[in-house]
Amino acid sequence: MPNLEIERKFLVDTTSLPDLTPAEGIAIRQGYLAIGPDSEARVRSMNDQTYTLTVKTAGELVRGEFETAYQKTNSIRSGQRQRVSALRRYVIGFLKLSRS
């Protein structure tokens, strides 16, 4: 049985954020694949050390999610014709902030 993901997004006034320049953050590269009309798979690399495969089911605000770790492969490659995003995630107190 998959876990439930509850999507929450907030508009943040970036002028009130602390300076993230000295923060190390986590480098994330991820790509998505449609695996049916109502579901998708995401492959993700975090700091090029941790790799996960996540399957997400249909839904907008709440949807099923199954995640598993996998070994490093060439599943997210630069220069290929695929939608790959890169971002950096920072943890400040209890907040997680992502910047692309």
Image: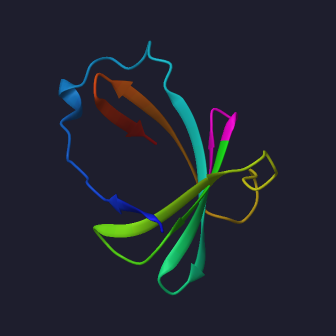
Image color mode: rainbow
Q: Residue at x 29, y 31 (%)?
A: 95
Outermost residue, front side: 1
Give percent across and percent down for residue 42.
58, 61
Give percent across and percent down for residue 33.
61, 70
> In which quarter of the view is residue 32 placed?
bottom right
Give percent across and percent down for residue 40.
54, 72
Outermost residue, bottom side: 37
Between 59 and 11, which is closer to the camera in this rendering?
Answer: 59
Image position of 65 (left or right of 63): right
26 w.r.t. 87: above or below: above
18 w.r.t. 49: above or below: above
> In which quarter of the view is residue 46 placed?
top right
Between 12 and 15, which is closer to the camera in this rendering?
Answer: 12
Outermost residue, top side: 22
Q: Residue at x 67, y 65 (%)?
A: 82
Q: Which residues are magenta?
A: 44-50
Image position of 65 (left or right of 16): right
17 w.r.t. 37: above or below: above
Give percent across and percent down for residue 19.
32, 17
